[in-house]
Amino acid sequence: MNQFKKIAEFGNSAEITADLQKYGTIKSYKEGEILIHENRSIQSIPIILKGSVKVYQSDDDFREMLLYYLKEGETCIMSFLGGLYNENSKIKAVAHEDCEILFIPVHKLSILTKKHPQWVDYIFRVYHQRFQELLEVVNAVAFKKMDERLLQYLTKKSEMTGSKSITITHEELANELGTARVVVSRLLKQMEKENLVQLERNKVILL
C-alpha cells in the first residue's frame, strides 16, 4: 500500500509493512472528527497515513490547550504509553484535516516490539520528537508573551499547510492557545498595524 511508504522511519522492510497491514485497521476521518477521546480506555494506537491530527489536553475546567500536531508517518506516543500500561487516555486527538489513520491494537504492540527492531527505533524517534515539542509548549506558556505564542502558532500552522493564508476564527485561535477570544482579537489587530498579518473574515494571512 502506498500509504505505508510515508512511514519513513520503518525503512524499506517489507516484513514490518506486511505485519502492519495484517494487524492494523485503516479508518478515514473528516476534518474536526475525534479520533481519541480523553479519559477513555486505549484499545489501539494511531499511525497517521494521510493528513494531520491535533492533540489536546484539557484542565479541570474543560479548557483545552493544543499540545502538538501529528503529521503523516507519525503516531501519538501518549496513546502508545497509555495503551502499554493500560491507562485511560490523557489526551484528545482531532482530525486537523481529512485523514486516514492506521490503528494498531494494543495487544499487538509487544509482537511488533519483539519482532522488529525498526519498530523500537520508530517509537524512540517519535518519543524524542514529542518530548521536544512538549518542552516548547512549556517554554511558551512559562516564558513567552501571548503575542509571541500567537505568532509562533500561526507560523507553524502556515508551515504545515504550505500556505500563508490560514483559515481560522478568533475563537478557534483562542481555544488552541488556551486564552480568551478578546485577547486574540486585540493582539491580531495590533499585529495587523505592525504589518505582520492581514486580517480577513475567518482568515489570517501572514505577511
Image (cartoon, helix red, strand yellow):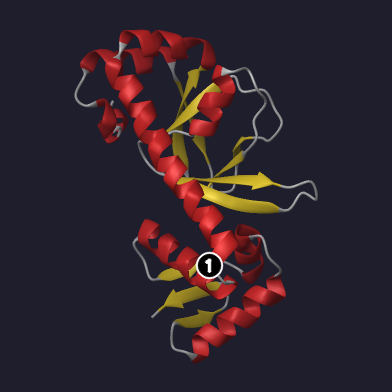
Picture quadrant where residue 99 is located: top left
Q: Can residue 82 be seen in this view?
A: yes
Give the residue at mark 1.
149
Task: For mark 1, give the secondary structure.
Answer: helix
Would residue 20 appear left or right of 66 to someone viewing this image?
left
Would residue 106 appear left or right of 62 to someone viewing this image?
left
Q: How many labels, in total?
A: 1
**Position in image of residue 150 (x %, y %):** 53, 69
At x 70%, y 46%, the residue is 58
Residue type for callout 1: Arg
At x 45%, y 48%, the residue is 133
At x 44%, y 10%, the residue is 110
At x 44%, y 33%, the residue is 75
Q: Which of 89 and 94 is in front in this view?
A: 89
Q: Residues within 10 Å of mark 1 (few under 14, many from 20)?
A: some
**Position in image of residue 69 (x %, y %):** 47, 48
Q: Is residue 97 visible?
A: no
Vertical arrangement, residue 147 with respect to residue 35, above or below: below
Picture quadrant where residue 44 is located: top right
Q: Nearer the viewer, residue 153 or 167?
A: 153
Q: Which residue lies furthest to the front in this view?
A: 143
